[in-house]
Amino acid sequence: MELNNVVVEKENNLAVLFINRPKALNALNSETLSDIGTAARALTEDDDVGVVIITGMGEKAFVAGADIKEMKDMSPLEARRFMIFGQSVFNEISNLPKPTIAAVNGFALGGGCELALSCDMIIASENAKFGLPEVTLGIHPGFGGTQRLPRLIGAAKAKELIFTGQMIDASEASKIGLVNKVVPYENLLDVAKALAHKILKNGQVAIRLVKSAINAGLDTTLEKGLAYEAETQGLAFSTEDKSEGLSAFMEKRKPNFKGR
Ligand code: CAA
């Protein structure tokens, strides 16, 4: 897969998707968004890939936001279309039927913070900076930040970050529950990969089903979420992995999951 602004590297059931536009601090122009969407669809189809890590190329930025130069002269209708496009690409990330880990290696601002929020988990390097600075530009977050940030960290903290546009460092992001873990920059990808490998040891169909149950539950009532959970668990019981996992426990051995 040859894309201008995204590089995908694969190793042992793990894919690392690099946003690769370091000269513009990996800012998301239309082409980069489109490349992310293309890569996400290919990774969805690729049965060899069980976990996807998303990170930024270069030492400075994960993603410094939507491309301000491209947005500068957009009409209201063009801006609306651009937001819907960005949201649709980030929905593809959020709905990817395998776990995603954002490995935030520097600035994650605006659309960059929103990309990280579309992933299942966020690991940040000590030099990472998070923020939704759009109001400092006279606009506001438009690639999902107004919806995903309050769902993750609560409305009051999300409003504080969005209304002030202030940047926070990785340790503050960890305190407010925005990131799962903070690690030294040099260890970032290794730690993300170690987490991925812990996930890859488990039954992959169960992981896919439980991700869909958690995501569906976040958008609905507890009652409907519980009903969905019972359905996905029923499906998990139809897999070979379920027979293998429960037998391995009884036989006091490690399971040999096949992902089916
Ligand atoms: N869009 C386009 N280009 C960007 C960019 C962006 N979001 N962020 C950085 N760049 C470009 C700069 O223009 C600069 O390019 P040139 O060398 O051609 O001038 C290059 O990347 C390096 O950036 P800086 O010189 O600014 O680097 P710095 O170290 O001085 O500052 C920074 C780093 C604090 C991250 C600063 O670049 C910055 O504030 N960037 C913008 C952050 C921002 O406001 N993001 C939100 C965008 S709006 C949005 O995302 C809307 C939405 O929700 C969809």
Image (tube, grey):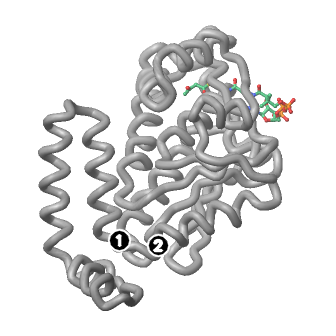
**Within the displayed image, which quadrant is ligand 1 positioned in?**
top right
Question: Which residue is at the front of the view, 37 or 176?
Answer: 176
Horizontal and vertical percent for residue 87? 42, 34
Question: Which residue is at the front of the view, 256 or 248?
Answer: 248
Residue under numbered circle 1: 204
SS for dot 2: helix
Question: Which residue is at the front of the view, 115 or 35?
Answer: 115
Residue 205 visible in the shown view: yes
Q: Which mark is residue 200?
A: 2
Q: How many marks?
A: 2
- Which of the 4 image quarters holds residue 15? bottom right
Pointer 2 with pointer 1, Cβ within 8 A: yes
Say if 169 sits above or below 79 in the image: below
Horizontal relation, residue 204 to residue 225: left or right? right
CA gap between label 2 and label 1 equals: 7 Å
Quadrant where the C terminus is found in the figure? bottom left
The residue that appears at 52% across and 69% down in the rendered structure is 198
**Mark 1 Cα shell of 10 Å, populated few (<14), some (14-19), many (≥20):** many
Horizontal relation, residue 30 to residue 215: left or right? right
SS for dot 1: helix
Three-letter amino acid code of the residue under disc 1: Gln
Horizontal and vertical percent for residue 113? 60, 34
Horizontal relation, residue 45 to residue 190: left or right? left
Horizontal and vertical percent for residue 131? 66, 26
Say if 147 sits above or below 181 in the image: above
The residue that appears at 23% across and 77% down in the rendered structure is 242
Residue 5 visible in the shown view: no
